[in-house]
Image (tube, rainbow, N blue to C red):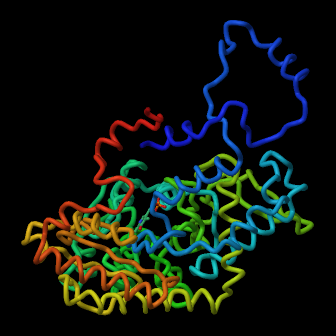
Amino acid sequence: MNERNVIYQKSVPGRTGYTLPDTKQREDDILAAIPQKYRRESDAALPEVTEGEAMRHFISLSVKNHHIDKGFYPLGSCTMKYNPKLNDKAASFTDFKEHHPMAPCSSAPGALRLMWDLERYLGEISGFAGVTLQPVAGAHGEFAGLLMMRAYHEHKGEKRTEIIIPDSAHGTNPASVTSVGYTTIQVKSNDKGVIPPEAVAEVMSDDVAGMMMTNPNTLGIFETHIKEIAAIVHEGGGLMYMDGANLNANMGIFRPGDVGFDMMHFNLHKTLSTPHGGGGPGGGAVGVKEELIKFLPFPVLDKDDDGKLFLNYDRPHSIGRLHSFYGHFANMVRAYAYIRNLGGAGLKRASEDAVLNANYLKELVREDYDLPYDITCMHEFVVSGNRQKANGVKTLDISKRLLDFGVHSPTNYFPLIVSEAMMIEPTETESRETLDYFASVMKQIAREAAETPEVVTSAPVNTPVKRLDEVGAARNLDVQYQD
Ligand SMILES: *Cc1c(COP(=O)(O)O)cnc(C)c1O
């Protein structure tokens, strides 16, 4: 029975879940203002239920989906850590929540101060001199960074057209490169899963505007040659962009700004525990070196002669505006609350625990799954389902079977350089018991794949819906209720 029927079957004429003051006169006035042809001919067929019934309906819907507040979510590269509710509480303070975005700066000193401090905290974590909070996703931050890269070269009177990207890069990297009108040169990782400097030297030229790197990379491996690579790119006149999506392994330990990167984006919705949301709203702040500050998107948060904060639009070299107002303010509040709550030592501990949890889990699953890069990992690691594939069980099947045990799938089929990839990121917020449970489920699925593969290939069986036509759902999106 579908959900629409459930709530409609509970409907009893005249039953309500609310009381309102008598608004009859007002309703009549409004009606009088609406021309007849636009009026509804009969009442909308809405279910008539009590508040309690409506609440149960929505709560029951909410637990049908898997989410981080419901179960383990080891989705590598996405850093699905638990989002502390304290952050939400801070974001819902009336003075933050109800401040109008069009209000003058003079009425928002607290909000501006929070943004100012957050910019400085992010600068301190990453080693960059200037930060913009405006971009609203990692990909948006990449776009902003590459626009600044282009502005930097144009300012010097140079026209460069290419960006170097590792073969393990996230898909947003080449997409952002194309969006700003550059082309991509791909370099290959070596058998240790890192980019060798020689590969960069080979393709570096006067046409190269810069290089994008992710560290740790999407294999969960620390790029050991960053300094040599940065020297090669800088020598050739290019800039170094760090994709900071994996910052969760780095806080308090490795600062990209200290080792040769010129700019990077943060994913507030990954590392700094703000919600991912269904495709947004996120937070893709960007940090830059001193000499790139003049290119930051406007408005830039600034102090006037009296030391008062204001949004400065007078920025002749700026790449311009990237979003309405100043990005997603409520996420800035959440990230700020998270940083203030943990403090420097707490952030460092979070990264250390994330790395420890990943290595612990790697050791637990290595017996049953192939480990293409068998070295100490950072906050995530990649296994291959090749052994299971030989028995007709694909990585997709393993992921579907995990749902039967109340666990979300790891990232599948990425990075592209590992066949049947499963990219596992437990994060620091999971207990040892949860990691042990996940490992025991992975072991059971490996056994099923060997002995009773049809159990895995026909999964899931315990979920509200079985296998869905995911491509169909994406291509022919239809969010209407159906009877
Ligand atoms: C998530 C991610 C991105 C893109 O970030 P969004 O916020 O999803 O746009 C880029 N690179 C890597 C490595 C990522 O994991």
Q: Quadrant of residue 461?
A: bottom left
Name the quadrant where ligand 1 sits.
bottom left
* Residue 153 seen from this side: no
Q: Quadrant of residue 424?
A: bottom left
Q: Quadrant of residue 330?
A: bottom right
Compared to residue 162, the image places residue 47 above or below, namely: above
* Front residue (pair 10, 452): 10
Give the residue furthest to the top: 36
* Residue 262 seen from this side: yes
Residue visible at 25% across and 65% down?
413
Give the residue furthest to the front: 12
Compared to residue 452, the image places residue 254 above or below, namely: below
Q: How many marks?
A: 0
Give the position of the C terminus as an image quadrant: top left
Residue visible at 82% across and 53% down?
99
* Front residue (pair 483, 399): 483
Residue visible at 50% across and 39% down?
4
* Front residue (pair 443, 348): 443
Give the position of the N terminus as an image quadrant: top left
Compared to residue 382, the image places residue 5 above or below, namely: above
Compared to residue 8, the image places residue 208 above or below, namely: below
Q: Where does residue 169 sit, x and y in percent of width and height? A: 32, 67
Give the residue furthest to the left: 390
Q: Where does residue 20 sit, x and y in percent of width and height? A: 85, 37
Q: Where does residue 110 sit, x and y in percent of width and height? A: 85, 65
Report the side of 149 relative to 228 (left or right): right
Report the side of 185 relative to 96 (left or right): left
Q: Where does residue 131 sit, x and y in percent of width and height? A: 63, 68
